[in-house]
Amino acid sequence: MPGFVQITDTHIVAPGALAYGRSDTAEALRRAVETINAKLPLWEGIACAIVTGDLTDHGTPEEYAHFLSIMDDLALPWCAVPGNHDQRAPMRKAFADAPWMPGEGPVNWVRNFGPFSVIGLDTLLEGAHHGVLCDEGMGFLDSTLSALGDQPAIVATHHPFMHAGIPAMDADNLRNGAAVIARLEAHPGSVRMMSGHVHRAVTGQIGRVTCQISPATCHAVLTDHRARRDPHLVLEPGAVTVHHWLELPRAGLVSDIIPTGLFPGPWPFQD
Ligand SMILES: [Fe+2]
Ligand SMILES: [Fe+2]
């Protein structure tokens, strides 16, 4: 069954540096790439990886080159949308040869997987941590949804609209996400919104729209439900998310969070 792997919030910094002085994000991405490559023979129909933003920590050409040098080893094609830690011009220049990268404007794209399509939307507002889908992006979403007819649609963004219950992160969500949700609710096929940014595995529902945030390959954000607290990073295990389409018991997208790294096993349950 068709599907893809979601990689998010890789936060690559310059070679040899640690993000925030603590997080070896390059090693975390290498571990994610090795994990995906090792498990791909067990997964059926996985066509590509989708990177949902914060590819780099500062958006410099050096960081994008470092990101590419690690992703070169991934045994899948990949596409990406930017996050608040990215910079559109250096990102476009670094990935100018990629078929999904538009020559100008926001980084929006659509990919048809057969039973469903993924619409990548650029929610980066440069200079801000929160996200906004610009007028051009909203127009792209409208025209793409209309062209899909009743095919199920998954919108991929860096910024979630759904709150995670972490006030320090929720303040920087997709500020005009209600308009995205309204459009998805009006779509005749099943709908989902998949995002990153919160560095945690969080799932919820807004109306007809399943909303899902995937964990980062590197550090996590501390789950802290208290108001007026600064966000804190914690070095929890990284993960990627495998999304694949299943026909039973009803057709739909199923998502499996895969911790990155090597673990004991697998062993048969019976000797
Ligand atoms: Fe991030
Ligand atoms: Fe982010």
Image (cartoon, rainbow, N blue to C red):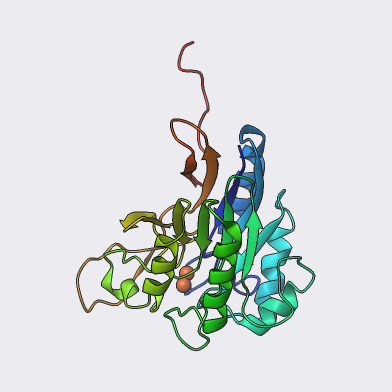
| Residue 250, picture quadrant | top left
Q: Is residue 140 above or below residue 202?
A: below
The structure residue drawn at horizontal position 80% and vertical position 70%, both measured from the top left corner, is 97
Lateral position of residue 6 relative to residue 237, left or right: right
Residue 166 in the image: above or below residue 48: below
Q: Name the residue nearer the viewer: 77 or 208.
A: 208
Q: Nearer the viewer, residue 13 or 94?
A: 94
Is 217 situated above or below 259?
A: below
Q: Position of residue 206 (x, y in %)?
A: 32, 60
Q: Position of residue 144 (x, y in %)?
A: 59, 65
- Residue at x-position 55% and y-position 54%: 6
Q: Is residue 195 visible?
A: yes
Could you tell me which quadrant the N terminus lies in? top right
The image position of residue 175, as x and y in percent, is 38, 79
Asked if residue 86 is positioned above or below residue 111 in the image, the reply reads below
Quadrant of res 38:
top right
